[in-house]
Image: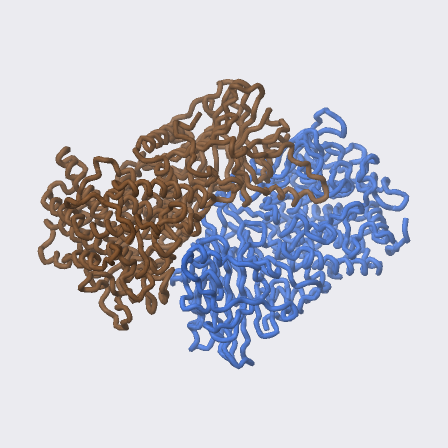
Chain colours: A blue, B brown
Amino acid sequence: MSDRSVPAFDGGGINFNAQHSCVGAFMSFTCGHFGGGGGIGVEIGKPANQNIYVGVKRGGRESRHAIKCLPFVRGGSFTSAAANFHVDQAHTAPPASVECYRREQIKRHFGWASDAWATDDGLAFTIYTPFAPIPEPGSGDTTALRASVLPAIVATLRIDNRGGSETRTAIFALDFPETGTRLLRPTASDEKSTPAPPAAASKLGFAHRRSLGVLGMLEDAPSDSADDLFAFQRWSVAEGVADVNPVHELGSCGGIGVEVPAGQSRTIVLAIGCYLDGIVTTGLEGRYYYTRFYAGLEEVLTAALQRSRELRDRAARLDAKLLASRLSRRQQFLIAHGTRGYYGSTQLLDVGGEAFFIVNEGEYCMMNTLDLAIDQAFWELRHNPWVVRNILDNFSRHYSYHDTVRARGGAEALPGGVSFTHDMGVNNNFARPGHSAYELPHLVGCFSHMTQEQLCNWILLAACYVAKTGDRKWLAENAPLLAACATSLRNRAHPRTGIMACDSSRCEDGQEITTYDSLDESLGQARSNTYLAVKCWAAWTALEMLSAMNASSLASDDRAPFESLAPQIAQHLCASVGADGTLPAVLEKDNPGYRSRILPVVEGLIYPFYWLNCLRERAGAAAAGGAGGAGAAGAGDDGDNDEARQVAARALRSPLVETLRRHTMQLLADPRKPNLFPDGGIKLSSTSTNSWMSKIALFQHVCRQVLRLHEAPQVAELFAAADAAHVRWQSEGSSFWACSDQFVSGVAKASRYYPRLITAALWLDESPKIVTTITAPRQSPRVTAGR
Amino acid sequence: MSDRSVPAFDGGGINFNAQHSCVGAFMSFTCGHFGGGGGIGVEIGKPANQNIYVGVKRGGRESRHAIKCLPFVRGGSFTSAAANFHVDQAHTAPPASVECYRREQIKRHFGWASDAWATDDGLAFTIYTPFAPIPEPGSGDTTALRASVLPAIVATLRIDNRGGSETRTAIFALDFPETGTRLLRPTASDEKSTPAPPAAASKLGFAHRRSLGVLGMLEDAPSDSADDLFAFQRWSVAEGVADVNPVHELGSCGGIGVEVPAGQSRTIVLAIGCYLDGIVTTGLEGRYYYTRFYAGLEEVLTAALQRSRELRDRAARLDAKLLASRLSRRQQFLIAHGTRGYYGSTQLLDVGGEAFFIVNEGEYCMMNTLDLAIDQAFWELRHNPWVVRNILDNFSRHYSYHDTVRARGGAEALPGGVSFTHDMGVNNNFARPGHSAYELPHLVGCFSHMTQEQLCNWILLAACYVAKTGDRKWLAENAPLLAACATSLRNRAHPRTGIMACDSSRCEDGQEITTYDSLDESLGQARSNTYLAVKCWAAWTALEMLSAMNASSLASDDRAPFESLAPQIAQHLCASVGADGTLPAVLEKDNPGYRSRILPVVEGLIYPFYWLNCLRERAGAAAAGGAGGAGAAGAGDDGDNDEARQVAARALRSPLVETLRRHTMQLLADPRKPNLFPDGGIKLSSTSTNSWMSKIALFQHVCRQVLRLHEAPQVAELFAAADAAHVRWQSEGSSFWACSDQFVSGVAKASRYYPRLITAALWLDESPKIVTTITAPRQSPRVTAGR
């Protein structure tokens, strides 16, 4: 079987969609939701609307048995098109119909890079989505780059009829509701770039116009059955398989199939891909980067089939790697689901000859939303650090602006400074330079500006990039901008407390919000918000650290703006703790958020922790590998690096850390469970039933790695129960919408089909060796009862 | 008012969609069906699915009055998108809502090239679709060609507030259900090709990604109000007009508007267009011809606005021309509706540098369906004869084939010959050479082959083209193919009767059908069908005529295949008339169609009549203008032309004409009304309730022009009543589907959104001077009672 030792999923219903995507094509083959259809979607931010038939029937292709399909088949069909022709004549009913496997006949094996559906009668359908680093465009490795941007995935459909006594017929088909289905008849020229495949691999498939398609070939068939594969196109899948005319070019449903003789097995390898030619965006005009390497859909699909062994092997290695992690199966599931959601939103463009990497914001399709980019950076810095630099540079080049600010209740325009937009546009329409698609003036809630948070995010993203890569050239080039960021950060802060006190003038008579844009007052307001205060503290720490790393190339005068407000923020937050040991969400006593208690207040702690580990790793690599090590770019500046490490380590020894540990422990241990849902899931705000999965993942990571709360058995148990709930949120509460972020009492209501749960992959870093006792000697966390 | 003297429509409900299209862009702005939405559709063969807001409200843009719209607004809206953001926060309801004018408050003025909606309170919305000849691509007149292929139309929205006492605010908006709405901010470079417009014309608009858009400007506004025009983009039109934030780039609804002060009026001129870049077809790879002349959507829309005066003036001249015809208002309506349906299906491509003209088959989107092309040829030969040659050549180059044939019940493969496919593909996917998208083997009804009919159609199309243009060069080049057509025609016929007796081997165990593919046995079977027999008779006549016209360039040996079977066919048909004077539909006594009586049996008579008139016109022009006349290409071959005229005239004196006159008169006068619907509409087959509007129009034309049946007052009355019914079929029975062809008891059930009713434009030729008494002296038609 093709499950490759990934155990069957048992953390909730198996009835949930998953995105299956390559990198950078903004494409997903989505399936899994029972009765929901799905299929190939490009640039749509939601599951596609095709009907999916993956099934097998008794007998040869002309038999009158029903085709038994995986339960993706949607109720209703598009076959009424036939009725638009047959007005006066009886239309012969399809010779065989379709039925679906029942839940109990199916197992689903959901690995990091494979999603396998296996039935009790020998059908196995597996979709492979191995991910891999993308060589930096322009760096010269065009062969590897071509391979990595292939806009297609592969799947296999295997029918094991070795124990059978009659022929069975297996099919894979998609019925497209929009007109344009056609058969694919690849020509030799589509196979120009790679060696010819083995003799048995004749290829057949179907497509939708020029943009989407599926190409299949038989694998390991006896040499005398090389032509068993057949293609069809009719209004109904059953007609396509069994009718005397398998192909009618008017038909909406394309498919391929094979007859499997008794006593044998057959595997169809499927390439599922897309190709959008020409300029696809407005504002900035970009085309898909893959159009540099592939001439069209047929070449893409042929290349995918030719590489199918390699792609499947890579998927197996990734599956094994996740299985070998010390994470629970629930944690593994959330990582695997989050990884799929992430890649389905990625889009690598060529804008004016330069690579432009975009992560689209799930169902909203906003481009490179900065408050997502910072959370997703941990993933990309591991796989493609150049992507993070690309995003940083595109924000500074196209999507930064300067504002003035206003203190609370004040009318006077005070000096502000530089910040960055929420996003770069939406739905392939780039926004005007210096403007986002999302942000509006005059508002106090959703769609208001996020000037303060995005300023922090750009600084933190820069710090993560430099800490991870040691790219001092980039740092030196961006030192003036970082200095401007420091000024801007200072101008928004209360000079004594360091807490954000001023809203951007872009808000007009409104006020800034945080990334939790639809949450209640506990996180809806940016000003005086403790979540954002800790992010500001981290941003100051970032500026201190980057200043240290850039020390050799800066005159001492230039370092002036980096006089940090981090100590003031820490001190003020520590002083704001209530009698019960917790921090209010908003430090304004007349704000309803003053009563709220939020867990993401700890989120900012991740940054100094991450930087310290990066700097140590690079120092270690440099020490081990000499000048040729990973930190070679800055290997000559050990002094600067030492100082940078000290900045990060000092931050982690701040009293703020202990304050936040107590805050968190208090909330988690409170018997009234203010920050837990009844199902055990984590409630980010005590006053709202609206919670964000990606932020929960970050929170859990900080709790374990920085605060070591998991050493308290109660917390470990609580987190394990929470993971179980979160798996159900995704697999049941978001069954149609694949991986989602925003859940209201466990049901995905917004931020669906979303990339950001990739933050859960941080958990993979939680190996014993990287977990260091960073902070000063302290007591083991202790659960205190109540307040 | 902008109704330009087109009277208000009163032939049925005004609640019907109409296509508003330019030529060759396969685009339509469709609106008119109450509650049905519509908007800009490209390459879809059905009304688009946008919501359309054309309305006005009391007060300035921020007033809280409802916007009163033309009743295109669809129930429900797409504003639920806002709910996907506002999870935890109250979303402020739009400050004003939308209501619709009631039926009795609206008049619709439906001219040949304008469609004007006027309300009782001074709103007038007019859409202009002037058509014009397309210079032949490659002929050198690129300026005129550029103008004629502009992929946009213009409309005006005028608010007459001269008698008002308060400001009113007018808006035009489209709400797109698919994501991608954006504002248009044209740059100076979009106006590069033509002089700058008057100062007051600042332009604002909106678009959907790169492909669809609307640009507007104010006309005749006082110079101090040049900036009154505003644009908006929100999820709801009401928010866009009235909210403090009129533009949110996430919004799905784009619009423009203007405040109209009391005592004044304002007119917004709108350009509504599309632009699809790059290759859009498969098989043969074509791009839109307009991409040769326009760089993108903004340039298209700007050019349309700059030409809006000219386009509206041309529309007015066309409106006036139709009004000045001696046709009834009902006939005028059917012509105007048919013209719109036709242009909405046209698609002018550039395939490998050469123009490729396509008419898509309405809702089916089959490309250049040949049995439509022959019926539509009368229109194109008047406006763009090169289009007919283009279609002829593309059939002979890419979509002809050779078959063998089988006699009824016989198994032996007999010599067949050349024929032509039903179509060239479907949904922008060109079919394989020599194959159609439509035709399948093994069938006896819908989707079977039409080999015999398409062979006739290509011959008849060639004859119409040559007769109209006198293009002897083309005739000489195609003489071998025409000879092969004669052979093929003969091989399918019974040698004694000339009637089709053999089915193509492509049918396998099936049999051929006619263009009436979904009709019952009366027209479903091609073999022995009398409708097709008369078409074969006309095809033989065509071959005789073309042979005569080509006589000078042919050796006498080469003329051998043109020995015509026309006399045999005529003789056999005359001998097959029953005691009641009518012909069976199918001349096989054991066929159910033997009992059917069909009106389209007369259709083939149109060809010799049309040719004779063409040849006479060209002879007249040549005589009047000498060598420089319209027939210059062949002006030196008067002898050939004389012989050709004699062929056509002889055909019209055939006893077959009198036989068909009696057949038709008998059916029309039969008190049992076998070929009339209860509402007075014409029933093409006595045994089916399925009728085709385009074929009815041809039938009526033949009845009047060739058979002079309208001279019998009963027939004139019957046709007038039928026209009234047919107007209701279109305006009520096809209210959503715009102009349709196939009606079952007055309701459009198939062949909807269709191009073929352009055949009704033949009625414009029915002026007294062109009506000649061609046939031999005869009695005035006389109504006989019963059989």
In the image, residue B284 sits, relative to residue B98, either above or below, namely below
- Residue A589: percent from left, percent from top: 84, 36
Quadrant for the C terminus of chain B in the image = bottom left
Q: Is residue A147 left or right of residue A732?
A: left
Residue projecting furthest to the front: B785
Judge by depth and name the residue closer to the eye, A644 or B360: B360
- Residue A476: percent from left, percent from top: 62, 41
Judge by depth and name the residue closer to the eye, A76 or B717: B717
In the image, residue A713 sits, relative to residue B357, either above or below, namely below
Q: Is residue B715 visible?
A: yes
Quadrant for the N terminus of chain B in the image = top left
- Residue A111: percent from left, percent from top: 64, 64
Tell how many labels.
0
Residue at position x 59%, y 26% in the image = B58
Q: Is residue B435 visible?
A: no
- Residue B761: percent from left, percent from top: 31, 40
In the image, residue B97 sits, relative to residue A235, either above or below, namely above
Judge by depth and name the residue closer to the eye, A521 or B769: B769
Residue at position x 64%, y 37% in the image = A439
